[in-house]
Amino acid sequence: MSSVTPNVVKQTVARSHFRVSRRNSDWLGCWGHHMKSPAFRIIKEHQKINHFPGSFQIGRKDRLWRNLAKMQTRCGKRDFNFFPQSFILPQDIRGLRQAWEEGGTRQKWIVKPPASARGIGIQVVHKWSQLPKRRPLLVQRYLHKPYLIGGSKFDLRIYVYVTCYDPLRIYLFRDGLVRFASCKYSSSMKSLGNKFMHLTNYSVNKKNTEYKANADETACQGHKWALKALWSYLSQKGVNSEAIWEKIKDIVVKTIIASEPYVTSLVKMYVRRPYCCHELFGFDVMLDENLKPWILEVNISPSLHSNSPLDMSIKGQMVRDLLNLAGFILPPADDMASGTTSGRSSATSLSSTAREKPRPAPEQVVAEKMKRAYYLTQKVPNQDFYTSVLDVLTPDDVRVLAETEDELSRRGQFERVFPGPGASRYLRFFEQPRYFNILTAQWELRYHLCKGKGLELLRSWCRQGFHAGVATDVLLWSLPRSHLLQKSNPHLNGFSKLDPSRISKTLPAQEPKDATRAPEPSPGAQSSSLLPCSGGASKKPGAPLAEPTPAL
C-alpha cells in the first residue's frame, strides 16, 4: 500500500486477511503511483505493482493521439476512426490553423493540458484568439452532436484491466459509470464557458448546486448512473446496447495495441518477469448522436474514490474481481522467514521442492526457439499458416496457455476481450508480431466453443510434467521437411542464428500437420486450476498446488 492507495482497495485487501506491510521488502502487491521505467528493476519476481512501464503512451493525452495517429497512418483511418482529430501545440500549430480555417466559425474546439485530470485546465473555444499558443496543449475537435439523455450530454467510464502485454491479455469490467453534465446541453456559442454543460467530470459537476446524486445502481436518475442501468434504459428505447458494447470492446483492444510496442519493450528491459506488472485503465468514452463510441482519453490511475453507495457498489465489486484476477503469489516459505527473495522464487514456489526452476533438455530449448522463429517469419499474418501452431506444443506453449486459462477462470464480472474468438483479426495491427499472441489467438479460435476439450488437453500435458520440460517420450517440434529442403526459402532467414543444420540432426524433421498431437480426452469434470502454477513460472512436478490468494 502507499499514500495514494484508494480506500476501496485497502478495505478489500483487509477483508481478504492481508495486512499492510511496514517494510520495503516483504510485500506481495503494491497499489501506488506510476514509476519511471528504471525503477521497475527493484520489483522482485514474486511482487506485483499496479502499473506497466510506458503505459503513459496512452495515459497522456498527447501520447495517446500520437500513437493512434500513427496507427491510422499504418493501418488506415477506417479501423482507427474513433478518436477526435487532435493537434499538439506548439508543434502542430500550422496544421491546426489550416483545420481551424476549414472548419469555419461554427466549429468548436476543446483545449486540454496533455497530462491533467479531473477536468483541470479544460476549456471549449471557437475563436483563434482564445487559444493559448505557447504552452503545451492538446487541441481536439469538439464532438458537438453528442447523444443526449434528458437533454444532457454524458460520457462512460469503462474499466479496462490488462494483466499482461506478452501475451496480451485485456479484460473489461461489465459495469461502469455514466457521468452526466449537470446542465442541459446547448450548441450556442454563448454557452461555451459553462463547464457544467460541456464537461462531464464528476469533480467539476459536483460543484454545481443543481447536481443530483444517485444512490441506486439500478436507477436511471441523478447525474451518475451505473453502466448497466444505461444499457437497460437504451434497450427500452429500442437501441441495441449489445452492439454498442461490442464497438467499445473493439476500440479498447485497438487502443491498447497502440501502446503495445513501447510497453512490451520496456517490460523486457526493466521488469524481471511479466507477472510483476498489471494495470487498471479508465477509458472515457462518449456516444455521438448516431451512438458511435469515441475515446476521449485514457486514465492510468482512474479514480477509485467511492463517495456514494453507487460508487462503492461498482468499484468495490470491480476491485475485488481485479485482485482475484491478479493471482498474487507467495515466495518460498524459508525465503520469507529469512527475509530474502532471490531470483529463484517463482509463481509456484510454495515448498522447498519447487525452488529451482526446471532445466529442459537442450533439444527442447532449441525446439522452442525454432518454433517461435518459424512463426514470426510470416511478414503478413496468414490464418492458414498460423493454424498449425497448435499441432505440436512446446513446454512454454503449455505453460502460457494454462496460465491464460487459469486466469480466465478467476475473471468474476470481467470479460476478456483479448485474446478471444476473433483475436486473429487484430494480429495485423501489431507493429511486431508476437509468438504468444499468435498461439493464444489460435487456441481461442479452435477451442472457444469446446472449452472442456481444450482444458483436458492441457491437463493431459501437465500430468506428464511436459509444462516443466521433464516429460519423456514426447514429440519435439521441428522444421517442416519442405522448408529444410528449400535452401532459398525465405522462412529460413529467421533461423540463421539457430544453425538449422545442427538442429536438423537433433530433431526429427517432420511436417507439423503429420505430427502426433497430444491426446484430446473427451470433456470431463473441470477444475479451476490447470497447472500447479500461476504467472507462467516453471515448476518441478510433484510440488504442491499453488492456489491464487483470494481477495474476497
Image (cartoon, rainbow, N blue to C red):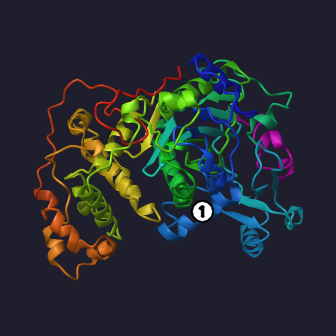
User: Which residue: 59% across, 65% down?
Assistant: 69
Residue that sits furthest to the right in the current view:
129
Residue that sits furthest to the front in the current view:
338
Q: Does the magenta segment cover residue 182? A: yes
Q: Residue 183: in sight, yes or no?
A: no
Q: In the rendered image, which quarter contains the N terminus?
A: top right
Q: Position of residue 499 (x, y in %)?
A: 27, 73
Q: Residue 291: in sight, yes or no?
A: yes
Q: Position of residue 475 (x, y in %)?
A: 15, 52
The span shown in magenta is 180-198
> What residue is shown with label 1?
67
Question: Callout 1: few (<14), some (14-19), or many (20+) C-alpha neighbours within 10 Å?
Answer: some
Instruction: Say left or right for 47 vs 453.
Output: right
Instruction: Say left or right for 364 vs 97.
Output: left
Give the vertical position of 396 relative to 91 (above or below). above
Q: How many marks?
A: 1
Question: Of the residues shown, which amino acid type is indicated by label 1?
Answer: Asn
